Amino acid sequence: MIPIASPDLSGNESQNVAQCLESTWISSAGRFISEFEDAFAKVAGTRHAVATNNGTTALHLALVAAGVGPGDEVIVPALTYIATANAVRYCGATPVFADVVADTMNIDPADIEHRITERTKVVVPVHLYGHPADMSPIMEVAQRHGLTVIEDAAEAHASRIDGRPVGSIGHLGVFSFFGNKIVTTGEGGAVTTDDDEMAARLRLLRGQGMDPQRRYWFPVVGFNYRMTNVAAAIGVAQIERIDALLARRTQIARLYTDLLAGAEGIALPVERPNAQRVDWLYTVQITGFTSDQRNRLIDLLAEDGIETRPVFYPLHLMPPYESTPALHFPVAEQVGAEGISLPTHTLLSDEDVRTVTDALVARVAQLRA
Ligand SMILES: Cc1ncc(COP(=O)(O)O)c(C=O)c1O
């Protein structure tokens, strides 16, 4: 089977983890945590990165630190991973969906303004599959309405828009370091910010709310969302090689694009002129396919020994987020039905990529016949 994702742990990961074990620093104190936070803040171009135990808790922490609570509304794209909306629910707030644009699959800045009410507190643009959302108009709308912007950059480490790295443009940025991400710590996450007070608040909330000046005194209800030293040890080794990891992903994406150029009815990922995308998952649209046809394609490719996955199902179609009367987000529904993500990771060979594109083209033709 050619897997869709695979961590590349061929640098100092094992050596760093062995150091944690030998030193017995395996919980959430130890030198790798601050090393990882400092190194990742450089990647995101921010003063602070606050490491957490996964991307979902990073989202929750960012929302709580931004003051989101019961009765508030948070605008999120209709097409994203479920965690973006779930974290809003954890706050007792309501996710309000906005449609996406077809080319990048990211939130449509023009649709955000329609969704703003007097309850809206935050907007969460998501940088999906590695292409950054169009941050300038999003920041402009947010500023006009006094909203906080939290970038969900889980899938787009080190991508840039208008020359700035994602995670440094909104008031807060959120990252995931799950095993399939560009930089992994196994499970892990981070919140980035330039705001010193916000960073202190994030650290307070991450560590059960314990007063940094007075041990075992808890002025607020916090969470245990700390990253372990073992996870950070893996992350430090990953960031040492981030340039090479990104470069190999770019090569793979370019090879996909070369091999699929001209394939009829398969729309390829774009890179807008003001963006520098990264290649988290190379995702194509099979023009005109229904969700059922796309799912049949995934099954046929699995028979060929190739693991793929559907683009996210739009959130408003899933039980926790359905509403009456039913809402429609036509672009999210279309790209959610037509989209399929192909294997994208640094351990793929060029030959693997050819195997995938040959099988994809043949199976799409079979399904269209
Ligand atoms: C867009 C997006 N947001 C949030 C998350 C949540 O991250 P984690 O799986 O680390 O909790 C993910 C993870 O896959 C994601 O893709």
Image (cartoon, rainbow, N blue to C red):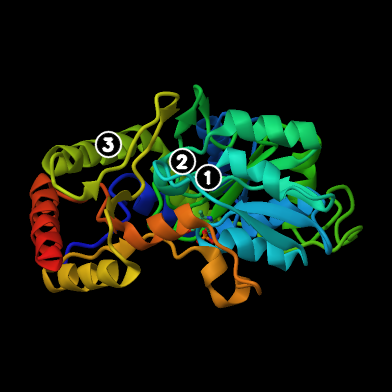
Which sits in the foreground, 251 or 319? 319
Asked if disc 2 and disc 1 are in contact, CB closer than 8 Å, the reply is yes
Locate residue 337 relative to residue 106 in the image: left or right: left
Residue type at mark 3: give it: Thr
Residue receiving disc 2: 157
Locate residue 60 relative to residue 306 in the image: left or right: right
Residue receiving disc 3: 250
Locate residue 281 relative to residue 1 in the image: left or right: right
Instruction: Report helix, strand or loop for mark 3.
Output: helix
Instruction: Report helix, strand or loop for mark 2.
Output: loop
Q: Residue at x 49, y 63 (%)?
A: 314
Could you tell me how far apart the alpha carbons at marks 3 and 2 are, in whole angstroms? 13 Å
Residue type at mark 2: give it: His
Counting from the top left corner in percent of width and height, residue 124 is at 63, 48
Which corner quadrant holds the C terminus? bottom left
Asked if disc 3 and disc 2 are in contact, CB closer than 8 Å, the reply is no
Task: Using the image, tell me which numbered label, if any, was put on residue 153.
Answer: 1
Label 3 packing within 10 angstroms: few (<14), some (14-19), many (20+): many
Which corner quadrant holds the N terminus? bottom left
